[in-house]
Amino acid sequence: MSEIDDLSRGELIALARRLFVEVQDLTRVNAELVAANAALTDRVARLEHIVSRNSGNSGTPPSKDDDLGRTPPADDPAAGSGGLPRKRGKRKGAPGAYLAWSPDPNETLDHFPQGVCGCGSDLGEAVDLGVYAAHQQVDVPLMAATVTQHDRHAVRCGCGKVHVAARPGDVADTSVSFGPNLVSWCVYLMVAHAIPVARCADLVAALTGTRPSDGFVHSLLGRAATAVAGTNRMIRTLITLAHVVSCDETPIRVGPRKVKKHLLVACTRIYTWYLLGDRSLDTFEVFVLPDLTGVVVHDRYQNYDAEIFGHLVHQLCTAHLIRDCTDAAETYPDAHWPTQIREALQALIHAANLAREQNLPAIPAHIADPLISAYRHGVRIGLKEVGRVPGRKQPKHRALLEDLRDREDDVLRFTTDLRIPPTSNQAERDLRPAKTQQKISGRLTSDTVTENRYAIRGYISTVSKHGADVIAAIRDAILGRPWIPPAWAPS
């Protein structure tokens, strides 16, 4: 190409036009690259946010903390002593279990020396000096299924009338059947320990020497659910009368297509009740919320604040709020307000536990007031540093701060009424079996099977909370006399 100075006017115009087209193309390409870079930046930020989620700053279960690429939660030195993280295992003061000496053994066996003494005398003829040492061994007998034949005789009275012996109440009206003990164990293994149907049948075969069919074992879920239906209706009624009810929900996969459902739980320290549905308002309208007369402890999900539930008194789960504050501290590493709010809530929870141990009705004012003041100042500082954005929907940390400000009574209600727990941990614990079952067995086969399973689960959970024998309660339900909760008492 000639030097620009040597180009004619026509050549310069052509060059300018060509360069103009190239600039337009480059401008377009640059705009596309800028947009792609912005999209990638946003995607990387979202992915970094996802992998930063752990059990310390979100609702992610602890089992996910070790997933590849996930950032584990930081150790909490305050949880232990000497600057070290709290050790695993039983907490100080918690009830323990140990192998204790039994004052009334089922069987006592005497053992005497055998053989011949060094002097040549037979030890069998030696003088008994009494017990030198005693050893107790706790064991279970080897199990084997037994077959009992019930022959029902007929007799003829002198008047000529024939009478047939009644069938025993625990024997099915078939020629051959499985007894209530074996049936109860199958239900217990499937529901209480999430043992899949085939493995349950295999386990029964290994323990007893007889293997029920997979279909029979599976059918026991419906049979047991029907047997406990009356008790579950009573449990639901008793929950609605309780002073405090913890509620929560967790996603589960149901049916051949693994449809996402939600399992809802309403519970107290002595009652448990489940409902299969979703997170829609329609499901919440048939939950226990419309009938509750006490305080509901929950995780701030919007449906709990729906207008139709305007009668509810709330306690927001402080465990969720503390996790949200931990997340805020990671998002704003130079800010002090997330740590201040979190530490104030943690100190109030600790103070509530100490006051409860002393049978006080509330946290003493001289302890609670400084902590509540620190909580309020932290919220004010946070609101100043995290401004509002245009529109109704606000960034999650701004929304958190506004809830902490506007719903202070719902956050701190546990400080003035120690019957109210500060967290919904009871509901979390009662939902944990559902999460375990999903990990072990995957999806449940249908809505009906899922409803049956958790009808039984609510029954045995309530039985266990009352300290009753779960196996016996299942057996009694199978025999038509289900366990019934004792007379209602505030909980």
Image: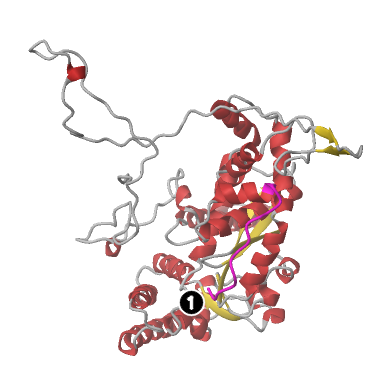
Q: Residue furthest top?
A: 120
Chief secondary structure of the magenta span?
A: loop
Asked if residue 375 lies in the magenta stretch, the reply is no
Which quadrant of the figure has residue 369? Answer: bottom left
255 and 271: which one is in front? 271
- Residue 172 appears at what percent x and percent y? 75, 38
Using the rendered view, name the quadrant where residue 258 is placed.
Answer: top right
Give 371 or 293, whichever is nearer the viewer.
Answer: 293
Assign a secondary structure to mark 1. Answer: loop
Can residue 42 be seen in the rendering of this structure? Answer: no
Does 169 sit left or right of 304 as displayed? right
Q: Quadrant of the N terminus?
A: top right
The amino acid at mark 1 is Ile
Q: Which residue is mark 1?
A: 420
What is the crowding at mark 1: few (fewer than 14 residues within 10 Å), some, or many (at least 20)? many
Q: Is residue 178 above or below residue 461?
A: above
Decide if residue 171 is on the left or right side of residue 387. Answer: right
Q: Which segment did they paint magenta? A: 478-491
Q: Residue at x 79, y 32 (%)?
A: 153
Where is residue 325? Give x, y as percent: 43, 70
Q: In the rendered view, would you say 112 is above or below 53?
A: above
Please state which of residues 298 and 458 is positioned toward the viewer in this rendering: 458
Q: Is residue 227 visible?
A: yes
Task: Name the spot of residue 491 as percent of width and height, x first.
Answer: 53, 73
Residue at x-position 68% and y-position 79%:
309
Left or right of 362, for residue 183:
right
Q: Residue at x 58, y 41 (%)?
A: 189
Q: What count of labels does the image hold? A: 1
